[in-house]
Image: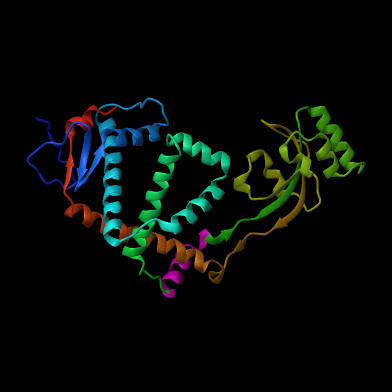
Amino acid sequence: MRKVLLILPLFLFFACQQSLPPEFVARVNDEYIKREELAKEIALVFEGESPDLSGESWMALKKSLLEGLIERKIVLEAAKEMGIEEGEEWKQSLSLLKEGYGEQEWQEMVRRYGGEEEWQKGLKEAFIRGKVMDAVCGGIQVGEEELKRYYDEHKEDFRVPERVRVRQIVVQDYRKAMKIHKLLRRKKASFEDLARRYSIAPEGKEGGDLGFFCREEMPQEFEAVFSLKVGQISRVIQSPYGYHIFKVEEKKKATQLEFPQVKERIRDWILQEKREECFQKWLKERKEKARIEINEEALEEIG
């Protein structure tokens, strides 16, 4: 007789008189989870490669992924009870998602999920989860005092560092770099024209414009850029990518964003955190009331 595994604290198990059929790895109330469903979740984690896990680590991963499937079943069951359906809103949401991903990235996700139907199924479940969360936790609000307290305690998070807007010319030959640098010093040609003509970097066709960046965003070799004045040209700087010449176009000093500028951003962060806490509490209560059975033998055999 097949054994039924009790997994705590992940699952609350109610014993039943009969074991689950071999093709199912779990049961959640009246819904069943097939072996294939868990196998697909595992495949998504490893993207088709063989998992390099064994023993307790391998079983722990399977239990964690199975818990996720069980929670999805519970949420979908609750959605039915609440009368939540996809309808026209889901179609509009799907259309916006496609636009947001772009064709190439969308097709990559379709490939990873094993087809358009499976990919859209995952998106639809996430959409329904959001609607259930709205129904359960939609009344949460964040007061002005809490927003201000968060800002005061996290002021460093709202400090914009010093930034510079820079153009660059990149070549692979040192002598060519020195020749270009000489032309720039003698003002025989503009930086933009020389970048378009000689630079091997992708932004060369745009006159070498890199836009704005701060110290943390660039390699250490380019630290010297921040000591230049607006309009000044750097010496030739070597990096693993070649030989660089920089020109500073604009500088912006470090600034502190004030509370009114970031208040709504803070509200979104706190609301998201509180809604997730509320939802996890609700989900825990639903799991405790649910009849959940795990087929230990099937779980061990997967993979």
Q: Position of residue 264 (x, y in %)?
A: 50, 67
Q: Residue furthest left?
A: 17
Residue, x 58% and y 64% (percent of image)?
A: 256
Q: Residue furthest front?
A: 87
The quarter of the rendered structure image containing the C terminus is top left
Q: Position of residue 114 (x, y in %)?
A: 42, 34
Horizontally, is 14 left or right of 103 in the view? left
Q: Position of residue 225 (x, y in %)?
A: 72, 46
Out of 247 and 137, give the one closest to the viewer. Answer: 137
Out of 237 and 76, give the one closest to the viewer. Answer: 76
Out of 117 and 252, give the one closest to the viewer. Answer: 117
In the rendered image of this protein, does residue 19 appear above or below residue 271?
above
Q: Quadrant of residue 254?
A: bottom right
Q: Quadrant of residue 45?
A: top left
In the rendered image of this protein, does residue 31 appear above or below residue 180?
below
Q: Residue furthest bottom?
A: 144
Magenta stretch: give its range: 144-157
Residue, x 82% and y 28% (percent of image)?
A: 175
Residue, x 77% and y 44% (percent of image)?
A: 206
Q: Position of residue 52 (x, y in %)?
A: 35, 26
Q: How many marks?
A: 0
Specify the principal SS of the magenta part: helix
User: Can residue 105 be seen here?
Assistant: yes
User: Can residue 234 be seen here?
Assistant: no
Instruction: Tell me, yes or no, whether the highlighted magenta stretch contains residue 148.
Output: yes
